[in-house]
């Protein structure tokens, strides 16, 4: 009888052991990242964020990066987050502006002067609940922006007339409207498509910030670059709501601790740093030329861009109030308020 009891106990322990081990395994969170893993967005931003969250969660979660188009593309980031294909997703709003209009306020030309400024202004709009309704199907972790676009071509662009008859790759509606206003022809593409389009001559140039020039190696296919300062492209880190809800409390608290304002600010600082590094890298290339719009050209751009504001306010729900609040936030940030 004693031997039988011991045998039963041993069998029970063997059966229970895998169960106990499985219970201790961290929950996998798939982080969709439709860009190269060496992107500074990951290396300086989302990567360290993930490490901090996993540490604070006490080993209860494992955030695994899925870079490139492995589980999402720039066009499917939102839909696949809502569907739970990805648990956490990085993306840009350009291809999604049928769903997200208010957040594109950062793209309106010449409204802000840095990624940190525009990212913090987005946080203030979020706190005021002026843009939150566009995100009712996902959990927002961070909203931030990418640098103002530079004109990247293989032909010098000194004045607006130099753009006549040229096709430019863009990633958003507002930027397409701006390119049209100043005389170019916009071709809407996702940033991963820019290199091939420029290489094949499908486009004559690319309107995109320095961070993308660096990430997508656009200096290999363009050599003239003009800083414009015309609008900042919004981007996001978002999470599937059900994925968040099923996490243990300690993991939820860790995600909340490092998201929101700290993550908005972190990513704004990251993209400003990317902007500076990308510009310096290209400036150091002997065969490249980096210039910026002259004050006279900026004045002409601003004048031609005026209808873009009216159209944005008209086509964006509560657009007038959102733009007014964004402008106030930028003014307050500059004043140190």
Image (cartoon, helix red, strand yellow):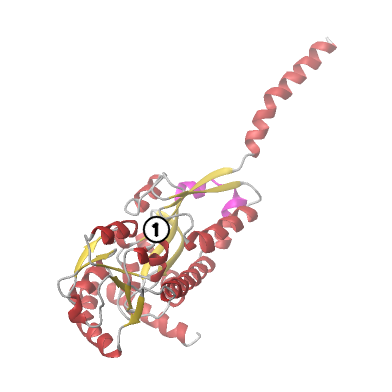
Task: Judge whether 290 appears above or below 4 on screen.
Answer: below
What residue is at 79 percent from the left and 11 percent from the top? 4
- On screen, residue 316 above or below 79: below
Q: In this view, does 217 lie to the left or right of 183?
A: right
What residue is at 42 percent from the left and 76 percent from the top?
Answer: 283
Rendering quarter of residue 327: bottom left
Which element is circle 1 on? strand
Residue sitting at x 23%, y 74% = 178
Q: In this view, does 39 lie to the left or right of 183?
A: right
Q: Which residue lies furthest to the top in this view?
A: 1
Residue 12 is inside the magenta segment:
no
Residue 320 visible in the current orientation: yes
Q: Does the magenta stretch include residue 248?
A: yes
What percent of the width, then of the height, locates residue 61?
A: 59, 47
**Magenta region: which residues?**
241-252
Residue 136 in the image, given as x and y percentages of width and height: 38, 57
* Residue position marked by numbered label 1 in the rendering: 91
Instruction: Report the residue that reaches farthest toward the bottom.
Output: 296
Front position in the image: 283 or 163: 283
Determine which quarter of the picture holds residue 91. bottom left
- For the stretch drawn in magenta, the main secondary structure is helix
Determine whether 270 is above or below 337 in the image. Answer: above
Task: Count all numbered tags in the image, as a single digit.
Answer: 1
């Amino acid at each position: 009888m004693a031997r039988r009891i011991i045998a039963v106990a041993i069998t029970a322990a063997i059966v229970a052991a895998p169960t106990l081990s499985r219970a201790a395994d961290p929950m996998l969170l798939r982080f969709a990242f439709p860009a190269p893993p060496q992107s500074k967005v990951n290396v300086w931003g989302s990567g360290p964020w993930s490490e901090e969250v996993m540490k604070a969660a006490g080993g209860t979660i494992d955030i695994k990066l899925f870079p490139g188009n492995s589980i999402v593309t720039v066009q499917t980031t939102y839909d696949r987050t809502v569907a739970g294909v990805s648990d956490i997703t990085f993306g840009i709003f350009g291809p999604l502006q049928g769903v997200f209009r208010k957040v594109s306020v950062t793209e309106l030309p010449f409204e802000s002067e840095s990624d940190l400024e525009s990212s913090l202004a987005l946080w203030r709009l979020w706190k005021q609940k002026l843009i939150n309704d566009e995100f009712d199907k996902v959990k927002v972790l961070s909203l931030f922006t990418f640098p103002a676009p530079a004109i990247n071509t293989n032909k010098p662009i000194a004045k607006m007339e130099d753009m006549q008859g040229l096709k430019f790759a863009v990633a958003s509606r507002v930027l397409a409207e701006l390119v049209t206003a100043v005389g170019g022809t916009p071709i809407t593409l996702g940033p991963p498509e820019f290199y091939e389009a420029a290489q094949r001559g499908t486009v004559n140039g690319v309107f995109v910030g320095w961070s993308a020039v660096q990430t997508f190696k656009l200096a290999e296919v363009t050599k003239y670059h003009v800083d414009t300062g015309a609008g900042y492209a919004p981007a996001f880190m978002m999470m599937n709501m059900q994925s968040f809800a099923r996490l243990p409390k300690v993991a939820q608290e860790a995600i909340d601790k490092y998201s929101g304002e700290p993550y908005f600010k972190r990513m704004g600082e990251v993209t400003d740093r990317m902007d500076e590094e990308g510009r310096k890298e290209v400036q150091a290339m002997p065969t490249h030329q980096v210039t910026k719009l002259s004050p006279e050209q900026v004045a002409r751009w601003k004048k031609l861009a005026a209808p873009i504001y009216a159209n944005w306010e008209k086509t964006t729900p509560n657009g007038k109030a959102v733009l007014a609040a964004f402008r106030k936030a930028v003014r307050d940030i500059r004043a140190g308020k």
